[in-house]
Image: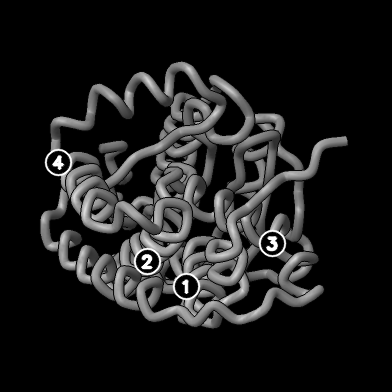
Amino acid sequence: MNKININPQLTRLLCSWLLLLALGVLLLNDFYLKAEYSNWLTGKLSDFSGILLVSLILFGLLPKYKISVSVLICSLFLYWKSPYSDLLILYINTLTPFTYGRVVDYSDLIALSMVPVGYWYVSHQKPNTLTFMHRLLKIPLLITTSFAIMATSQLAPPQDNFVFSTKPESQPLEPAKVVEIIKTVAYNNEMFCDSCELDEYQGRFYLDGLSLSYIIGKRRRTIEFEVIGIHDGFLLGPVNTYEEMQILQDELKAAIEEHFKDVEFVLKERQPVF
């Protein structure tokens, strides 16, 4: 069996503190922080750590072509962040079982400040002797780094958030009645109860690729809903649940407005693909 040969400089980089820090930040941000704390900071963290990772890897692979690599990274990132890459993204999403996307925001270009950081770090890397740990971890770290870079631009599943609130002069909602209405709609859509029996004020239903969560405000004045689905190509191939999400939302709206006359419906729009 042929061994995978990785040049010594790249091997050292894969085990360096800077690459491990960038890799850890990228994975933590993409798989936890973005979902729990979605804001401008978590949006920029992926760009900064991703650009730094790409810079370190490419400078390590092509140490004699640092200027060319710098120009290549900056050019590709500028193209990716511009509307001109829409057609490329469409082709990728059509031909692969994944869905990629990005927001056209030129302020993201400040992440290119990581290119000179990577350039400087690789240029000043000391040619230390490779240890057994270097050789043991180089392939797993290369695979993990490649996965993190490819996964960072994948779109999160589509998510709809909407709220029903009572008018000030109305009576508070009856939690038991609200839950019964939600259960009826969920069961009519062949969804299963995940945690709807544990708390009278909140619960969750699910179906393959689709989930429905609700929370009744403690003052019984609001009902907050979160519907999460999947879009074309998101890990599971060319399928999506947009239609099912819309049907679920419409049926909940109709049922709640039928039973509670003095409620107002507020919808937060779904994020666009590009």
Instruction: Say which residue label 4 marks.
Output: 82
Q: Position of residue 29 (x, y in %)?
A: 48, 69
Circle 1 sits in a helix, a strand or a loop, which is it? Answer: helix
- Please give the name of the residue rendered at 69% of the width and 74% of the height, measured from the top-left corner: 130
Residue sitting nearer the eye, 144 or 172? 144
* Disc nearer the start of the sequence (4/2): 2
Task: Determine the CA span between mark 4 and mark 1.
Answer: 24 Å
- Are the residues tagged 2 and 1 within 8 Å (C-beta)? yes
Residue sitting nearer the eye, 132 or 54? 132
10 Å crowding of disc 1: few (<14), some (14-19), many (20+)? many
Instruction: Say which residue label 1 marks.
Output: 22
Query: Is 161 left, or right, of 35 in this rendering?
Result: left
Q: Is residue 164 above or below residue 49?
A: above
- Are the residues tagged 3 and 4 within 8 Å (C-beta)? no
Task: Determine the CA span between mark 4 and mark 2.
Answer: 20 Å
Task: Determine the CA span between mark 2 and mark 3.
Answer: 18 Å
* Disc nearer the start of the sequence (2/3): 2
- Of circles 2 and 3, which is in front? 3
Badge number at residue 94: none
Task: Determine the CA span between mark 3 and mark 4.
Answer: 34 Å
The answer to which quarter of the image holds residue 148 is bottom right
Instruction: Say which residue label 2 marks.
Output: 52
Circle 2 sits in a helix, a strand or a loop, which is it? Answer: helix
Looking at the rendered structure, the kind of residue marked 2 is Leu
Circle 4 sits in a helix, a strand or a loop, which is it? Answer: loop
Task: Determine the CA span between mark 1 and mark 3.
Answer: 16 Å
